[in-house]
Image (cartoon, rainbow, N blue to C red):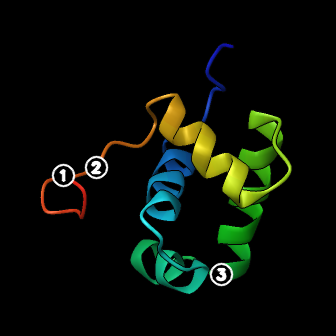
Amino acid sequence: MPQPAFSPRELDILVRLCRGETYGAIARALGISPHTVDTHIRRLRSKAGVATRSQLVVLAVEQGFFKSAPGDPGT
């Protein structure tokens, strides 16, 4: 299955979502509203062809979009 083409902003949000950040935390870190975060995540789910955030995170991990950073739990 080919990897979906995500924008740099979408990838940033996806990595933060995979790290367990809330919409509010993602919004504060990026200087956008939580509603905008929700919009990006809905677009990510649509591009990836998945129905839920959990499925999106699983896809991101399986396809290598998310790599643990040094210091993250599990590294």
Instruction: Please tell me in which quadrant of the rendered image residue 48 appears.
Output: top right
Q: Amino acid at mark 2?
A: Ser
Disc 1 crowd, CA 10 A, few/some/many (<14, 14-19, 20+): few
Residue 5 is situated, as x and y percent measured from the top left of the image, at 63, 27
Dividing the image into 4 quarters, which one contains the N terminus?
top right
Looking at the image, which residue sits at the far left? Answer: 70
Q: Amino acid at mark 1?
A: Thr
Q: Does the rendering let one see residue 7?
A: no
Q: Which residue does the image show at 60% across and 35% down from the upper left?
A: 6
Looking at the image, which residue sits at the far top? Answer: 1
Q: Does the rendering let one see residue 75?
A: yes
- Residue at mark 3 to residue at mark 1: CA–CA distance: 29 Å
Residue 73 is situated, as x and y percent measured from the top left of the image, at 24, 64
- Residue at mark 2 to residue at mark 1: CA–CA distance: 7 Å
Q: Which residue is disc 1 drawn over?
A: 75
SS at badge 1: loop
Instruction: Please tell me in which quadrant of the rendered image residue 37 appears.
Output: bottom right
Is the residue under label 1 in contact with that under label 3 (CB below 8 Å)?
Answer: no
Count all numbered tags in the image, as a single digit: 3
First-in-chain label (3 vs 1): 3
Q: Which residue does the image show at 53% across and 53% down from the upper left?
A: 14
| Mark number displayed over residue 68 | 2
Residue 67 is situated, as x and y percent measured from the top left of the image, at 33, 42
First-in-chain label (2 vs 1): 2
Is the residue under label 1 in contact with that under label 2 (CB below 8 Å)?
Answer: yes
SS at badge 3: helix
| Mark number displayed over residue 34 | 3
Q: From this view, report whether residue 24 is shown above or below residue 68.
A: below
